[in-house]
Image: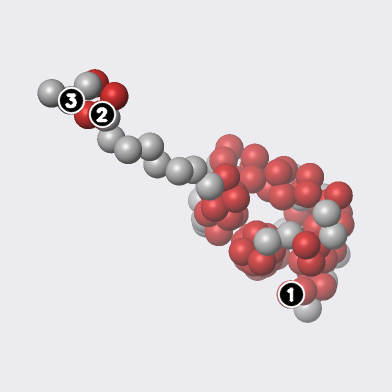
């Protein structure tokens, strides 16, 4: 006879970095995306090249999407990104914003 604990579904491992990246890659705006931007923006204590490549890619994707929708640099920073993260992402994208 199985115990109640054995009958429960196995625990699913949660990868917070993957959740963060998925939120940034998402095209939907919302509280989850805003929190993800603030989290990514707070990572400025680590040099940009030391951030995981998937996170850098997600940030570039999100900032590129914001630029394509007509957002200025100051408006992107207001979404939760730090100036350092925005500057580096713009440099990587080969783009500039007013």
Q: Position of residue 30 (x, y in %)?
A: 56, 41
State yes or no: discs 1 and 3 in contact (Cβ < 8 Å). Answer: no
**Circle 2 or circle 1, nearest the eye:** 2
Asked whether the beta carbons under mark 2 and mark 3 sit within 8 Å of each other, the answer is yes
Residue 79 relative to residue 15: left or right? right
Image vertical order of residue 5 relative to residue 28, above or below: above
> What colour-coding does the image apply?
secondary structure
Residue under label 3: 2
Image side of residue 26 versus residue 75, left or right? left
Residue 93: give its label: 1
In the picture of the structure, the residue carrying the numbered disc 2 is 6
Residue 67, x across and y down, in percent: 70, 65
CA separation in Å, label 2 and label 1: 50 Å
- The mark nearer the N terminus, 2 or 1, is 2
Residue pushed farthest front?
1
Mark closer to the observer (1, 3)? 3
């Amino acid at each position: 006879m199985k115990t109640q604990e054995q009958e429960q579904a196995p625990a699913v491992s949660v990868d917070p970095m993957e959740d963060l990246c998925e939120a940034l890659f998402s095209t939907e705006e919302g509280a989850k995306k805003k929190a993800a931007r603030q989290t990514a923006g707070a990572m400025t204590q680590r040099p940009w090249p030391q951030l995981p490549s998937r996170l850098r890619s997600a940030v570039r994707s999100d900032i590129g999407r914001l630029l394509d929708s007509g957002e200025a640099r100051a408006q992107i920073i207001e979404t939760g990104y730090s100036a350092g993260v925005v500057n580096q992402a713009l440099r990587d994208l080969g783009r500039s914003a007013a």
